[in-house]
């Protein structure tokens, strides 16, 4: 399970409240490891109980205040051990691929529209990633941390390019088989 590791990573980058963490997941970490706000808050409680994080002291009254968390030595050790652990790649589980397989059996009404919709979504995500790359990784930013973060983003860019190419090919082949001629996506 990687959610606790994603949270530990985010907190080591910057101590944060649960609300700040959920916002950071929505803006960055969530692009490759999504979690609901409830999952994040639940995991914060578990990590705190396990002695891997703690709420930072505050001068505000306890009622209604945002707890800001930091990672303790045990959390850093757990994250370091997880980073070093061997793990096989996860099998792809994409409902669109399964629906295409099902369409081969029951027919494909609406499949073309869904493929086009997905193509648009991947094109938009690629645009987002390229904007993030331009904003966050200008020439000259070459620390080890930046190189690794940039590699993660480049992985996302490469995946979006893969999906755009694959969906374009799938639309072309689907149109060709449906109409006996190729159609531009």
Image (tube, grey):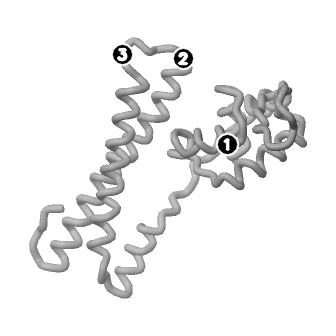
Marked residue nearer the N-terminal end (3 or 2): 3
Marks 1/2: CA–CA distance? 28 Å
Residue at the top extreme, as displayed: 140
Give how far across and how far down residue 140 sits, in percent.
Answer: 39, 12
Is 107 on the left-hand or right-hand side of 30? Answer: left
**Dot 2 surroundings within 10 Å: few (below 14), some, or many (20 or more)?**
few
Marks 3/2: CA–CA distance? 14 Å
Instruction: Kindly indicate the quadrant of the structure image that contains residue 127.
Output: top left
Q: Which residue is mark 3?
A: 139
Is 77 on the left-hand or right-hand side of 87? Answer: right
Residue at the left extreme, as displayed: 181
Instruction: Identify the secondary structure beneath mark 1.
Output: helix
Q: Are marks 1 and 2 in contact (CB under 8 Å)?
A: no
Residue found at x 66% / y 52% = 37
Closer to the observer: label 1 or label 3? 1
Instruction: Identify the secondary structure beneath mark 2.
Output: helix
Figure check: 174 above or below 62:
below
Marked residue nearer the N-terminal end (1 or 2): 1
Question: 52 or 96, which lies in front?
Answer: 52
Q: Which mark is residue 19?
A: 1
Q: Which residue is mark 2?
A: 144
Instruction: Identify the secondary structure beneath mark 3.
Output: loop
Residue found at x 42% / y 74% = 99
Is 162 on the left-hand or right-hand side of 149? Answer: left
Q: Which mark is residue 60?
A: none
Give how far across and how far down residue 185 sits, in percent.
Answer: 18, 62
Give how far across and how far down residue 25 sits, in percent.
Answer: 59, 43
Marked residue nearer the N-terminal end (1 or 3): 1
Give how far across and how far down residue 27 sits, in percent.
Answer: 51, 41
Q: Are marks 1 and 3 in contact (CB under 8 Å)?
A: no
Residue found at x 58% / y 50% = 34
């Amino acid at each position: 399970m990687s959610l606790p590791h994603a949270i530990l990573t985010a907190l080591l980058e910057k101590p944060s409240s649960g609300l700040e963490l959920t916002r950071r997941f929505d803006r960055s970490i969530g692009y490759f490891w999504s979690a609901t706000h409830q999952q994040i808050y639940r995991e914060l409680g578990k990590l705190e109980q396990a002695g891997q994080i703690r709420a930072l002291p505050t001068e505000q009254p306890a009622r209604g205040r945002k707890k800001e968390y930091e990672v303790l030595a045990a959390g850093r050790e757990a994250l370091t051990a997880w980073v070093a652990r061997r793990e096989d790649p996860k099998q792809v589980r994409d409902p669109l691929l399964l629906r295409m397989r099902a369409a081969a059996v029951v027919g494909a009404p609406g499949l073309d529209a869904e493929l086009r919709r997905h193509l648009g979504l991947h094109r938009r995500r690629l645009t987002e990633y390229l904007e993030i790359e331009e904003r966050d990784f200008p020439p000259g930013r070459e620390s080890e941390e930046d190189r690794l973060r940039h590699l993660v983003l480049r992985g996302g860019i490469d995946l979006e390019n893969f999906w755009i190419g694959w969906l374009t090919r799938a639309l072309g082949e689907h149109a060709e088989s449906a109409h006996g001629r190729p159609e531009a996506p």
